[in-house]
Image: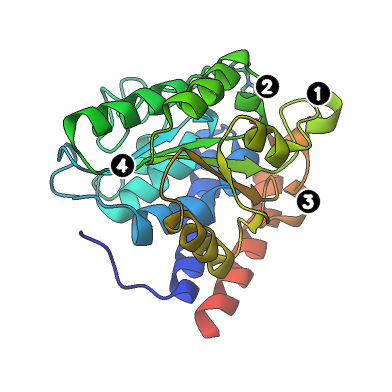
Amino acid sequence: MQTLKLSNKELQAQAQRFRIDVLKTLHDKGTGHWGGSASIADLLTYLYYRRMNIRVDEPQWEDRDRLILSKGHASPMLYAVLEGRGFLEKGTLSSFRDLNSSLQGHPCMNKTPGVEMSTGALGHGLSVGLGMSLISRMKGNSFYTYVIVGEGCLNEGQSWEAIMAAGKFAPEKLVLLIDYNKVQLDGTANEIMPLDPLADKFRAFNWNVSDRTFDGHDMESIEESFRWLDEQTDGPSVIIYDTVKGKGVSFMENSNAWHGAPVGDDHFEKALPELTEQLAKWEDD
Ligand SMILES: Cc1ncc(C[n+]2csc(CCOP(=O)(O)OP(=O)(O)O)c2C)c(N)n1
């Protein structure tokens, strides 16, 4: 496994550097999707730098762990992490959303090394992930399939069909990671479609569900969540992460206004120092 030996603190700092990369990119390109990108920075960093069994120099290696970003609008953070990890050449992020760029607004598996599934239409990722995990079992492979969803994906009926089917076929290595930031595009999750009691719903569908939720912005807590996962021996598993939409910039946090809004000059100049100050604290610690 080509993992890197970074401590939790170093991972925390690396995730913050990715937030900075993403904020700069969104500002440079006059585009958005900060909120849902910032909320998965820590989880994606942990997955690609600590957890996933991948070969950067062989992105199509058959037994690699798969990650599907079902909430495809958060593509900027996925691209930042893929670039940081070496799947993309340094500087590729600066072509985000350019015409014919390999980095489209939503992930495209035919254009971007490391992207396993094209996503953007909410709710498809888990069905595809279920298929991948069943194929893994049939072929005798050992890879995990991780699927990241937000509330929007869980508002889609297709997700619940996949949840029901996974309860029946019980793939051991299908893992649903829920970025539970409780804010969507045009309101809170409770205003749009309440999901609670979320863990109980998965239990009722015969999934492995931890008795606790995990802090999706704390590497120790993320590490604990995977320790819990490693204790699960059969059936699909779900991990629910408490997260903050827009995490890291005080005036962008917990606000649907920053779901897709472009990052203009004024906001960028106020936001960047908040991110860099926090980064300096982690680097000094
Ligand atoms: C099928 C479908 N319907 C609507 C949209 C438009 N859309 C994009 S993101 C979004 C809200 C997503 O909310 P959430 O999953 O909470 O996003 P997060 O905060 O996790 O990024 C919506 C409605 C879409 N991409 N696909």
- Whether disc 2's CB lies below 8 Å from ligand 1 is answered yes
Image coordinates for residue 131, horizontal then vertical, percent: 35, 23
Q: Distance between the residues labelled 1 and 3?
A: 22 Å
Of 267 and 131, the residue lying toward us? 131
Q: In this view, does 132 lie to the left or right of 68?
A: left
Q: In this view, does 65 lie to the left or right of 146?
A: left
Q: In which quarter of the image is the N terminus?
A: bottom left
Q: Mark 3 points at which residue?
A: 251
Q: What amino acid is at disc 3?
A: Phe
Q: What amino acid is at disc 4?
A: Thr
At a point 66% along the width and 32% down the height, the residue shown is 204
Element under label 3?
Answer: helix
Image coordinates for residue 272, horizontal then vertical, percent: 62, 58
At a point 70% along the width and 43% down the height, the residue shown is 181
Q: Crowdedness of circle 1 by 10 Å Cα count: few (<14), some, many (20+)?
A: some
Q: Name the residue under label 4.
A: 92
Tell me the tag on residue 192.
1
* Marks 1 and 2 close (CB-CB < 8 Å): yes
Of 211 and 246, the residue lying toward us? 211
Quarter holding residue 159: top right
Q: Mark 2 points at which residue?
A: 155
